[in-house]
Amino acid sequence: MKRKIGSVALVVRDYDEAIRFYVDKLNFELIEDIQLDNNKRWVLIAPNNQAETNILLAKAANSKQEKSIGNQTGGRVFLFLHTDDFWKDYNDMKSKGISFLEQPREEPYGTVVVFEDLYGNKWDLLELKKQ
């Protein structure tokens, strides 16, 4: 049996502002955007259309969900964006106004820096060392 994680839900305030951020600033691709009812859409984004795992942008539907926007993991890094060209992606993101919380650093596993998305969720931009 082959199994994988297909999608990870990310609670957002507004579909369109989230799409603009991820597509325009992080160079993600909009994979699907389907209207389900008056308030709900099925919106999938990914770093590219070949990615096995994508992000489901889920608009907060109540006050409890609204409270989790930007803090889905209690302040820890939530998602890890892997790259094969750290400095290209870092400089591109920096030029587009992405908020970095530290300077890039070398770790035993690779080159990494923490950044925030438009809601304050923490991400790692990470280029793993070649094995």
Image (cartoon, rainbow, N blue to C red):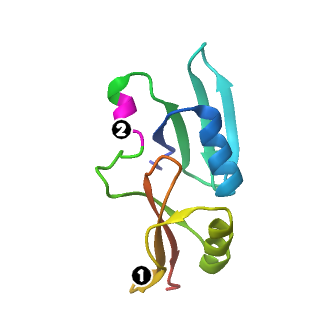
In the rendered structure, the answer to whether residue 109 lies left or right of residue 54 reads: left
The magenta stretch is 65-69
In the rendered structure, the answer to whether residue 21 lies left or right of residue 66 reads: right
Residue kind at label 1, given as amino acid type: Tyr
- Which quadrant of the structure image shows residue 86? bottom right
Q: Is residue 68 magenta-colored?
A: yes
- Report the residue that reaches farthest toward the top: 38
Q: Residue at x 68, y 31 (%)?
A: 33
Foreground: disc 2 or disc 1: 2
Q: Is residue 53 magenta-colored?
A: no
Q: Which residue is mark 2?
A: 68
Q: Secondary structure at mark 1?
A: loop
Mark-to-mark CA distance, 2 and 1: 30 Å
Q: Residues within 10 Å of mark 1 (few under 14, many from 20)?
A: few
Q: Position of residue 42 (x, y in %)?
A: 59, 29
Kindly indicate whether the residue at mark 1 contacts the one at mark 2 (C-beta within 8 angstroms). no
Q: Position of residue 51 (x, y in %)?
A: 62, 55
For residue 99, the mark is: none
Q: Residues within 10 Å of mark 2 (few under 14, many from 20)?
A: some
Eyeballing the image, is 47 above or below 15? Answer: below
- Between 32 and 116, the residue placed more toward the observer is 116
